[in-house]
Image: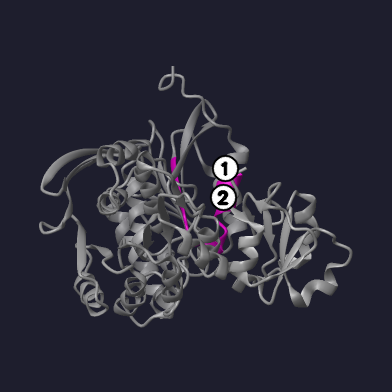
């Protein structure tokens, strides 16, 4: 049996107290009692909404062979006889285990941050590194104060490449996380107006993202977006903390990993990349110029950690859009079908522009419409009315004539759109769900985009519930 951790090593790393007859080792780690697997350890973390200790018995029923619990909660656990490691604070213990995982690892580590594109870039890099060895990367968007240590603690000792996503919505959040991860390469995808309500301007956002440089291993490298307006600021910040190896990506003539040409369609793209002075053709399995641009950072990171580059380039052809970030569904409706583009995970002005461009690049069937279903961009602060209003120009320039909206902030866009646009507005997501399901037609292309807090995943779910997958016999004989 190949253990993720032996119980003895866990106790030592976390400074915990063993309770009961501990198993020899564990096969995995979970913080969700519903999805914990047989032979795994369940960490009873106390979150903002729920306390994992309340679900310890469910975790055991689902197969957990070991639980990590707080000393103060022992009396409340009643008659549970499952083996335990008792600690003062469960999240702090997980952090200690994550740090121990990094200390034992010989993997080459890449950390990714940025205002837009972190998760998709992480998935691209996971794909690109896979032909070169065993890759460990975060699931979903595990990029915060519990997601990063959890991802670290789950990294097996024999991992050869590690890919970590690090997020933030306030200053001083990236710094402690990157010092756990200790990457050999740090990537900043871009700086844009995300979480702007917590910052005065884009430079403050850039300063917060630049905290990632502080955790780089000695001799480590930074990869920066040469096309971004904050490039000069980020380069200076990297130099200030002693980063000597600074590389760039983008369309800029001086970019080290350069996007020389781009041909995109609704399902992917072909790009010509200049890497180390050599021009190569790269096929990318997910659509969008923004994805092609970040693919240059991916190929740059792959080269810096010693990956097999032919394999990395070939792997990008198999890339698929991530759920909530461009995933596509072809759904049967009436005698035809509609195309659903799921961009429901999150939204800020930069990602809105990218999603609208994806919609514009997707041809509807005969008599079909391009429909943008949009919800509020949250955490924009005092900039919110202006930023929502400015989307009107983006939509008009892209030729989008049908815009269906919900959310208090989207009222600014509603008021800015001309009468020539089919503008539908509902105050709540629930009201918009019903309207969208009843109003879509055969041939339509429907793109759904909002911040996560709006719950636009309900629109996606309702469309998937009401319209079956379309069997395209002409395209798939």
Q: Nearer the viewer, residue 77 or 463?
A: 77
**Residue at the extreme right:** 79
Residue at screen point 33% across, 54% down = 354
Residue wearing tag 1: 463
Q: Is residue 104 visible?
A: yes
- In the image, taking residue 271 as reference, residue 367 lies left or right, namely right
Spot occupied by residue 401 in the image (x, y as percentages of width and height): 37, 49
Magenta stretch: give its range.
Answer: 445-462
Query: Which quarter of the figure is the C terminus placed in?
Result: top left
- In the image, taking residue 42 as reference, residue 146 lies left or right, namely left
With respect to residue 231, does 62 lie above or below?
above
Residue 174, numbered circle: none
**In what element is the residue under mark 2?**
helix
- In the image, taking residue 301 as reference, residue 57 lies left or right, namely right
Residue at screen point 37% across, 71% down = 215
Q: Nearer the viewer, residue 11 or 296?
A: 11
Check disc 2: other Cα within 10 Å, few if <14, some if 14-19, many if 20+.
many
Quadrant assignment, res 249 = bottom left
Spatial distance from mark 1 to mark 2, Cα to Cα? 6 Å
With respect to residue 132, does 459 lie above or below?
below
Residues under numbered marks 1 and 2 in contact, where contact means CB atoms less than 8 Å apart: yes
**In what element is the residue under mark 1?**
helix
Residue at screen point 21% across, 65% down = 246
Check disc 1: other Cα within 10 Å, few if <14, some if 14-19, many if 20+.
many
Quadrant assignment, res 267 = top left
Is residue 187 shown in magenta?
Answer: no
Q: Nearer the viewer, residue 52 or 3?
A: 3
Residue wearing tag 2: 459
With respect to residue 96, does 269 lie above or below?
above
């Amino acid at each position: 049996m190949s253990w993720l951790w032996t119980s003895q090593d866990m106790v030592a790393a976390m400074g915990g107290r063993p309770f009961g007859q501990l198993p020899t080792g564990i096969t995995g780690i979970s913080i969700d009692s519903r999805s914990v697997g047989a032979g795994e350890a369940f960490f009873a973390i106390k979150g903002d909404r729920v306390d994992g200790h309340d679900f310890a018995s469910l975790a055991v029923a689902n197969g957990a062979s070991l639980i990590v619990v707080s000393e103060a909660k022992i009396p409340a656990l009643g008659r549970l006889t499952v083996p335990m490691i008792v600690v003062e604070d469960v999240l702090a213990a997980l952090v200690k285990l994550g740090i121990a995982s990094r200390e034992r690892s010989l993997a080459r580590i890449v950390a990714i941050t940025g205002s837009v594109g972190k998760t998709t870039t992480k998935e691209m890099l996971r794909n690109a590194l896979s032909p070169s060895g065993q890759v460990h990367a975060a699931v979903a968007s595990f990029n915060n104060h519990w997601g990063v240590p959890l991802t670290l603690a789950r990294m097996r000792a024999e991992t050869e490449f590690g890919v970590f996503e690090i997020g933030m919505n306030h200053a001083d959040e990236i710094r402690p996380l990157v010092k756990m991860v200790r990457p050999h390469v740090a990537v900043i995808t871009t700086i844009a107006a995300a979480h702007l309500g917590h910052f005065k301007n884009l430079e403050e956002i850039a300063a917060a993202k630049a905290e990632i440089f502080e955790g780089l291993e000695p001799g480590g490298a930074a990869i920066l977006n040469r096309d971004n307006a904050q490039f000069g600021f980020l380069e200076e910040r990297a130099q200030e903390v002693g980063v000597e190896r600074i590389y760039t990506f983008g369309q800029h003539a001086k970019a080290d990993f350069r996007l020389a040409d781009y041909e995109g369609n609704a399902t992917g793209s072909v790009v010509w990349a200049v890497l180390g002075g050599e021009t190569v053709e790269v096929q990318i399995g997910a659509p969008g110029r923004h994805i092609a641009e970040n693919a240059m950072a991916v190929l740059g990171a792959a080269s810096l950690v010693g990956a097999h580059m032919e394999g990395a380039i070939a792997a990008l052809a198999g890339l698929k859009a991530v759920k909530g970030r461009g995933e596509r569904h072809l759904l049967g409706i009436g005698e035809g079908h509609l195309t659903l583009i799921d961009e429901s995970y999150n939204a800020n002005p930069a990602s809105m522009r990218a999603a609208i461009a994806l919609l514009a690049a997707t041809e509807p069937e005969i008599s079909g419409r391009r429909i943008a279903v949009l919800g509020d961009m949250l955490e924009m602060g005092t900039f919110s009315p202006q930023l929502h209003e400015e989307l009107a120009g983006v939509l008009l320039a892209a030729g989008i004539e049908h815009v269906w909206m919900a959310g208090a902030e989207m009222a600014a866009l509603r008021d800015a759109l001309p009468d020539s646009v089919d503008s539908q507005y509902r105050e709540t997501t629930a009201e918009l769900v019903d309207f969208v399901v009843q109003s879509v037609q055969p041939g339509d292309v429907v793109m759904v985009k909002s911040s996560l807090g709006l719950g636009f995943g309900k629109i996606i779910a309702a469309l998937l519930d009401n319209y079956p997958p379309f069997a395209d016999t002409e395209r798939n004989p």
